[in-house]
């Protein structure tokens, strides 16, 4: 009987060692396997010109804020389409020179807040100077990354992007961060260039990665639903999406 008990104990010990060894083996194997969901760049280097240490912001002000550029000429209509309310919390993603940041800050008033989000330090510094000079205390700048807008969870009711979507090198990751930053029922507005072979300028066809319907598919796959497409722009389009779920 004692021999039988000793034998049983040996079986238990052997089984325990086998399970432990198997667990260690699995852990070692999983450590070697790269994350399958890791997103690949859709257009490497798309933001390189904005990340140069010697970038001159004045040249971008002259390029972005000039008559003839549709989003500049139609900025008031675009702002009206957002239907902003006093006290609202808004993020201007890809804020650039701050053209829309300033307009949005004025529209939401002193009780509202605007997060001016950009990947370029020089643009962030420019917006800070402009906000100070204009006495706009409801603007907070955010230096983002190419994977995330770097905003707190459920911190805003509306996210606005103008001629920025085609500069998202990792759109799936960025859209996920926007989804997290929006409160339930929050809205995402996308203004970008129409990419239509045979119609769009050559510069747009070469520079802009995705056409409008592809953008819709990507945004909706990230947990949004398109609810409106105002039709007053020609070279650009404007789409309003609403966050689905939490």
Image (spheres, helix red, strand yellow):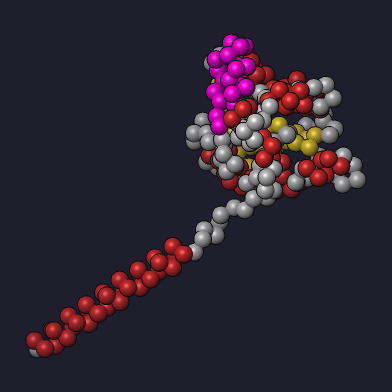
Q: Is residue 1 above or below residue 143?
A: below
Q: Residue at x 61, y 11 (%)?
A: 133
Q: Single out the residue that lies furthest toward the right.
A: 198
> Residue 24's quadrant in the figure?
bottom left
Residue 233 in the magenta stretch? The answer is no
> Residue 49's quadrant in the figure?
top right
Counting from the top left corner in percent of width and height, residue 113 is at 55, 21
Q: Residue at x 58, y 46 (%)?
A: 173
Q: Residue at x 40, y 66 (%)?
A: 28
Q: Is residue 22 above or below residue 32?
A: below
Residue 132 visible from this viewpoint: yes
Q: Nearer the viewer, residue 202 or 52?
A: 52
- Quadrant where the N terminus sits is bottom left
Counting from the top left corner in percent of width and height, residue 215 is at 72, 44
Q: Is residue 204 above or below residue 231?
A: below
Q: Nearer the viewer, residue 174 or 215?
A: 174
Q: Residue at x 57, y 43 (%)?
A: 147
Residue 159 visible from this viewpoint: no
> Residue 20's quadrant in the figure?
bottom left
Residue 133 in the magenta stretch? The answer is yes
Counting from the top left corner in percent of width and height, residue 182 is at 56, 35
Count of marks overlaid on the render: 0
Q: Which residues are magenta?
A: 124-143
Q: Is residue 113 left or right of residue 63?
A: left
Q: Single out the residue that lies furthest toward the front.
A: 54
Counting from the top left corner in percent of width and height, residue 208 is at 77, 43
């Amino acid at each position: 009987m004692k021999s039988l008990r000793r034998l049983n104990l040996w079986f238990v010990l052997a089984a325990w060692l086998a399970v432990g060894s198997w667990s260690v083996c699995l852990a070692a194997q999983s450590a070697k396997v790269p994350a399958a969901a890791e997103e690949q760049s859709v257009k490497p280097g798309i933001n390189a010109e904005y990340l140069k240490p010697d970038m001159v912001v004045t040249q971008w002000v002259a390029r972005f804020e000039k008559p003839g550029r549709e989003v500049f000429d139609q900025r008031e209509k675009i702002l009206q389409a957002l239907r902003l309310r006093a006290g609202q919390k808004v993020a201007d993603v890809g804020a650039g020179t701050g053209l829309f940041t300033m307009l949005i800050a004025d529209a939401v008033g002193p009780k509202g807040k605007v997060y001016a989000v950009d990947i370029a330090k020089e643009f962030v510094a420019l917006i800070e100077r402009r906000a100070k000079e204009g006495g706009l205390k409801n603007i907070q700048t955010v230096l983002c990354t190419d994977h995330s807008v770097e905003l707190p969870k459920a911190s805003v009711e509306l996210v606005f992007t103008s001629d920025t979507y085609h500069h998202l090198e990792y759109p799936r990751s960025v859209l996920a961060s926007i989804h997290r930053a929006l409160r339930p029922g929050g809205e995402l507005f996308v203004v970008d260039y129409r990419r239509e072979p045979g119609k769009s300028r050559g510069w747009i066809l070469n520079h802009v990665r995705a056409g409008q319907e592809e953008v819709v598919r990507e945004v909706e796959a990230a947990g949004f639903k398109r609810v409106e497409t105002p039709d007053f722009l020609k070279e650009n389009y404007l789409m309003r999406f609403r966050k689905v779920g939490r």
